[in-house]
């Protein structure tokens, strides 16, 4: 009798589990927005950079030649919200950490996207007239892209995707993201080939933003669920290293984002742009990855 009841209980438990699973799968075609904590857990399990193999890169330079690094990015790279961003943005702080043998160029542009269909694609020239958007010339390089090409970088650090997450951009043009980032990589390769330079690339996860504020329309859950997986796919395809500037690094609600050096209110922040301290954390993380994966020799 006891045995029969035990079997009955087990069968009932299985039925309940199957019913629950069926209910969850019933609307599997619908995109469900998870809570911030759930989203982070799912994305991290799927896209943890620790599960990706590091690629050992090598650069050989002439004695006395500096390692030229181009930091491709948006307003976070440019240093928006940071007092004296030219000295305190993450590219400048990275340069100080790396030392005199390196030259780090800030090629960040506020509002920049990787995708071409936006008001400020990083690669292309966007024109404005009387303060209003007047279109994009896809045959003309943007000023920041041309600046990056002209410096003939040995290392290219790509940190784009934050602005791509905006609803008007991502929901309609998400298929452009991977192809445009691949095109960017290929253009840097082609540019370097003429000078005998084979650039080394690092693809960065966009730094974390506050999904409750969604400043400027940036959606952190899209970054985690859709953009980071695409960055990983490109890294695997091209055998490139990724730099995790998203998970377990900055918290949009703590003092790495507070604009105490820019505002009378020390707790003022938009949950999107890190301050000087936050930029310093980004710089340290990037240097750690370079130290671990890049060997430079002078001859």
Image (tube, grey):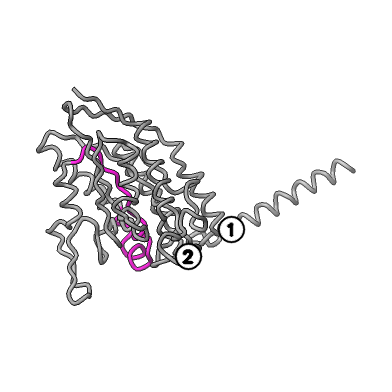
Label 2 CA crowd tier, 10 Å (few <14, some 14–19, many 20+): some
Residue 191: numbered disc: none
| Residue 140 position within the rendered picture, expressed as x and y whole percent measured from the top left | 12, 58
- Label 2 sits on residue: 268
| Residue 294 position within the rendered picture, expressed as x and y whole percent measured from the top left | 31, 31
**Which badge, 1 or 2, comes first in the chain's sequence?**
1
**Residue at x 44%, y 49% (from the top left corner):** 246
- Label 1 sits on residue: 24
Name the secondary structure under disc 1.
helix
212 magenta-colored: no
Label 1 CA crowd tier, 10 Å (few <14, some 14–19, many 20+): few
Q: Which of 117 and 81 is in front in this view?
A: 81
Kindly indicate the quadrant of the structure image that contains residue 84.
Answer: bottom left
| Residue 262 located left or right of residue 196 | right
Span of residues in magenta: 153-177
Looking at the figure, which quarter contains the C terminus? Answer: top left
| Residue 289 position within the rendered picture, expressed as x and y whole percent measured from the top left | 38, 36
Name the secondary structure under disc 2.
loop
In the image, residue 202 sits, relative to residue 180, either above or below, namely above
**Residue at x 65%, y 56% (from the top left corner):** 20
Name, please, the residue furthest toward the bottom.
130
Name, please, the residue furthest toward the right.
1
In the image, residue 215 sits, relative to residue 151, either above or below, namely below
Q: How far apart are marks 1 and 2 (CA)?
A: 40 Å
In the image, residue 154 sits, relative to residue 85, either above or below, namely above
Q: Which of 191 and 230 is in front in this view?
A: 191
Q: Nearer the viewer, residue 59 or 100?
A: 100
**Residue at x 51%, y 62% (from the top left corner):** 33
Say whether marks 1 and 2 touch (CB < 8 Å).
Answer: no
| Residue 212 located left or right of residue 234 | right
């Amino acid at each position: 009798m006891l045995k029969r009841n035990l079997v009955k209980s087990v069968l009932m438990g299985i039925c309940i589990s199957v019913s629950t699973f069926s209910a969850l799968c019933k609307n599997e075609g619908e995109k469900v927005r998870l809570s911030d904590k759930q989203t982070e857990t799912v994305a991290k399990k799927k896209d943890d950079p620790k599960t990706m193999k590091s690629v050992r890169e090598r650069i050989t330079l002439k004695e006395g030649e500096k390692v030229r690094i181009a930091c491709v990015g948006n307003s976070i790279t440019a240093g928006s919200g940071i007092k004296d961003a030219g000295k305190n943005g993450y590219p400048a702080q990275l340069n100080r950490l790396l030392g005199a043998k390196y030259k780090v160029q800030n090629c960040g542009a506020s509002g920049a996207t990787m995708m071409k269909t936006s008001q400020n694609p990083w690669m292309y020239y966007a024109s404005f007239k009387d303060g209003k958007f007047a279109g994009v010339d896809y045959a003309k390089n943007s000023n920041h892209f041309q600046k990056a090409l002209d410096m003939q970088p040995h290392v290219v650090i790509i940190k784009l995707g934050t602005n791509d997450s905006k609803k008007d951009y991502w929901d309609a043009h998400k298929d452009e993201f991977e192809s445009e980032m691949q095109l960017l990589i290929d253009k840097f390769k082609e540019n370097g080939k003429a000078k005998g330079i084979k650039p080394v690339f690092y693809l960065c996860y966009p730094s974390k933003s506050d999904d409750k504020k969604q400043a400027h329309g940036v959606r952190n859950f899209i970054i985690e669920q859709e953009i980071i997986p695409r960055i990983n796919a490109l890294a695997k395809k091209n055998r490139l290293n990724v730099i995790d500037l998203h998970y377990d690094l900055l918290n949009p609600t703590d003092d790495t984002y507070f604009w105490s050096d820019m505002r009378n209110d020390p707790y003022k922040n938009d949950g999107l742009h890190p301050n000087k301290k936050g930029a310093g954390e980004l710089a340290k993380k990037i240097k750690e990855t370079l130290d671990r994966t890049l060997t430079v020799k002078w001859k």
